[in-house]
Image (cartoon, grey):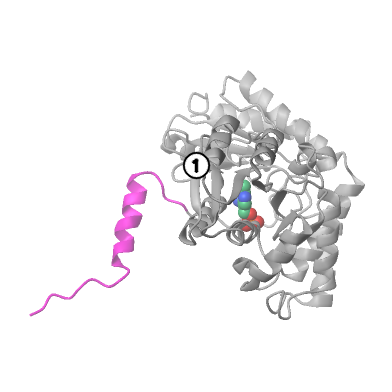
């Protein structure tokens, strides 16, 4: 009798066991709608505390009532509204670019920006530590014939050498501005000079820069003196400092017009949901009306880092809003984050494959509305529950 072959998904249980034995299990954990006054959130990306701001939630609700819960189609079919246009105009004005195009997420914005400029005449020069969405964009670009070259993290000289070596007519340099795991900044101005010298385009992922760096939180283009620069573009997310959902590409009008017609993650994707567009627009207006918020965020990040280092931990000095604390192993990183959560301090945990082996860490994202008392409590909990802490 022929042996029955295993069911097609049986192999997934083996893969799950392998991940478990390597300490890499990931699971979903619904958060409470009302975290309570005792909880300190250092895990979410709601940097400026806009996600639940009454003006933002009211604008999201009003947009849903006026335009519907969903966009109903791709932007090129039925998904385009005056709300999307208003958001794009205000984003471009705030960030100092000629135009902007909103996408359904920062991820799809990155995919669209990179792939629509790709092909056999193109080369893409990428920082090794780029975010997963940029890595995926580069993979798609490569599949379309683009030459992909990597340079060592934040190494401008290596980036210049890679551009010189690229050997294709259209060259692009692709990098995060604020790296999401360690929170360090790339030298955007130096990379812009290298690109200008080479005739290459500079493509930035400013997901963690918008609302955080640059005057009034206007982002990395502003911080690097690149407002209106003809050779630069940036993708942003609307889901971090703006507390909503969605993404955008900001850059010259010619690029935005090209994206509208050719970016597959724009053309074949349902438009950004109106409540997200309305919420993001309200948050952007609040940010412009209260330009001191990014400064408050930064001082919270600096206080967190200083407190943790004073407690003997190895915390990064933040250039933006992310503070990262080294853990001795991937298992320790997971257990440490669990202990923090149990003690009422939510922190992020990064281990392979999100970071290279040996670089596991807990990650803290500062928020503009954290009080001194909350920062002190967070430092105490993180130090006491840490690998060498007293509370174990
Ligand atoms: N780039 C970076 C650096 C990010 O951290 C993220 C979000 N994790 C994204 C892009 C993707 O943005 P979104 O969540 O809006 O898809």
Magenta stretch holds residue 102: no
Residue 10: percent from left, percent from top: 29, 67
Image quadrant where residue 125 sits: top right
Q: According to the image, label 1 marks what residue?
A: 150
Left or right: where does residue 63 sit relative to residue 331? Answer: right
Magenta stretch holds residue 14: yes
Q: Is residue 253 visible?
A: yes
Q: Is residue 57 visible?
A: no
Residue drawn at (63%, 72%) of the image: 269
Q: Nearer the viewer, residue 349 or 150?
A: 150
Q: Nearer the viewer, residue 237 or 172?
A: 172
Image quadrant where residue 199 sits: top right
Residue drawn at (32%, 69%) of the image: 9
Q: Residue furthest left?
A: 1
Q: Residue furthest right?
A: 289
Residue 189: percent from left, percent from top: 72, 35
Left or right: where does residue 213 sit relative to residue 163? Answer: right
**Quadrant where the N terminus lies?**
bottom left
Q: Residues within 10 Å of mark 1 (few under 14, many from 20)?
A: some
Residue drawn at (87%, 58%) of the image: 55
Residue 174: percent from left, percent from top: 60, 46
* Extent of the magenta region: 1-26
């Amino acid at each position: 009798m022929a042996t029955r072959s295993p069911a097609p998904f049986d192999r997934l249980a083996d893969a799950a066991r392998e991940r478990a034995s390597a300490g890499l299990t990931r699971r979903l954990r619904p958060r409470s709608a009302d975290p309570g006054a005792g909880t300190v959130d250092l895990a979410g990306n709601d940097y400026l505390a806009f996600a639940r701001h009454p003006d933002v939630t009211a604008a999201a609700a009003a947009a849903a009532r006026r335009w519907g819960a969903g966009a109903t189609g791709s932007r090129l079919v039925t998904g385009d509204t005056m709300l999307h246009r208003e958001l794009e105009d205000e984003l471009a004005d705030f960030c100092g670019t000629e135009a902007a195009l909103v996408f359904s997420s920062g991820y799809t914005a990155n995919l669209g920006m990179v792939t629509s400029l790709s092909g056999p005449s193109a080369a893409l020069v990428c920082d090794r530590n780029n975010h997963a969405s940029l890595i995926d964009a580069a993979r798609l670009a490569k599949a379309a014939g683009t030459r992909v070259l990597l340079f060592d993290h934040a190494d401008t000289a290596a980036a210049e050498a890679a551009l010189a070596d690229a050997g294709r007519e259209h060259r692009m340099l692709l990098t995060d501005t604020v790296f999401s795991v360690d929170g360090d900044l790339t030298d955007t101005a130096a990379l812009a000079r290298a690109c200008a010298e080479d005739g290459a385009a500079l493509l930035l992922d400013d997901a963690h820069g918008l609302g955080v760096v640059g005057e009034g939180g206007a982002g990395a283009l502003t911080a690097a003196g690149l407002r209106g620069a003809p050779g630069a573009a940036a993708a942003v997310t609307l889901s971090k400092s703006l507390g909503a959902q969605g993404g955008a590409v900001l850059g010259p009008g010619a690029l935005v017009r090209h994206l509208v017609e050719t970016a597959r993650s724009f053309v074949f994707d349902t438009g950004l949901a109106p409540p997200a567009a309305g919420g993001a627009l309200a948050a952007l207006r609040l940010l412009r009306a209260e330009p001191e918020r990014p400064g408050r965020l930064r001082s919270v990040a600096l206080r967190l880092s200083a407190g943790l280092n004073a407690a003997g931990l190895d915390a990064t000095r933040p250039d933006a809003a992310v503070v990262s604390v080294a853990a001795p192993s991937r298992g320790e990183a997971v257990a440490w984050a669990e202990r923090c959560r149990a003690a009422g301090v939510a922190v992020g945990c990064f281990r392979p494959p999100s970071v290279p082996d040996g670089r596991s860490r807990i990650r803290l994202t500062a928020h503009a509305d954290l009080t001194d008392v909350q920062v002190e409590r967070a430092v105490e909990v993180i130090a006491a529950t840490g690998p060498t802490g007293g509370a174990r």
